[in-house]
Amino acid sequence: QVQLVESGGGSVQPGESLRLSCVGSGFTFSAYIMSWYRQVPGKERELVAQITANGEQTYGSDSVKGRFTISRDNARNTVYLQMGKLQPEDTAKYFCKAYLNFRNEYWGQGTQVTVSS
């Protein structure tokens, strides 16, 4: 069956870095647009970064530009989010999403990132 499993979250201090990973299985990973979203309780899920199926184009929200980088390794069915210069406002649960079309869209269970001093 389809699975997306995120890992790499944790608790860090402001200014530190983390790398999140998301491994997909049960679908043709290399055909899917991959995205990272984040959500804090009581707020809507927010798109953080996105990468095309072949990895040639990426998008990052204004709030993370210059600090976060999305990448993928289709040979390993994995998408990454390298997060640098983390700030308390980056605290959230981070989710990865695979999207091909409206019938083929999958979400992971999320990984918590907490930034505090």
Image (cartoon, grey):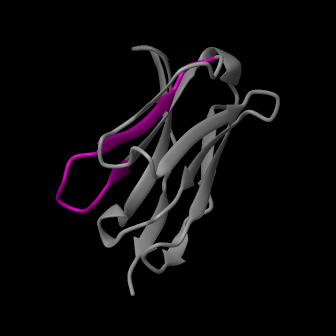
Q: Is residue 8 magenta?
A: no
Count of all numbered marks drawn on residues in the image:
0
Residue 60 relative to residue 21: left or right: left
- Residue at the far right: name it: 75
Residue 41 is a magenta residue: yes
Provide residue 103's location: percent of width, then percent of height.
Answer: 44, 14
Q: Which quadrant is home to the N terminus?
A: top right
Q: Residue furthest front?
A: 66
Start and end of the magenta stretch? 38-53
Q: Residue placed at 28% from the left, 60% from the top? A: 40
- The residue lying toward the viewer, choosing from 62 and 91, is 62
Give the farthest residue toward the left.
42
Residue drawn at x 36%, y 62% is: 90
Give the residue drawn at x 60%, y 41%: 4
Picture coordinates of residue 70 (x, y %)? 56, 39
Q: At 39% from the left edge and 87% from the top edge, which residue is drawn?
A: 117
Quarter of the rendering containing residue 55: top right
Q: Measured along the vertical axis of the image, is residue 109 above or below residue 93?
A: above
**In the visual, does 107 lie left or right of 87?**
right
Locate residue 29: give its quadrant. Answer: top right
Along the viewing direction, whichever of 13 and 24 lies nearer the viewer: 13
Depth check: give the residue in front, 11 or 56. Answer: 56
Q: Toward the viewer: 78 or 12?
A: 12
Q: Position of residue 59 (x, y in %)?
A: 43, 29
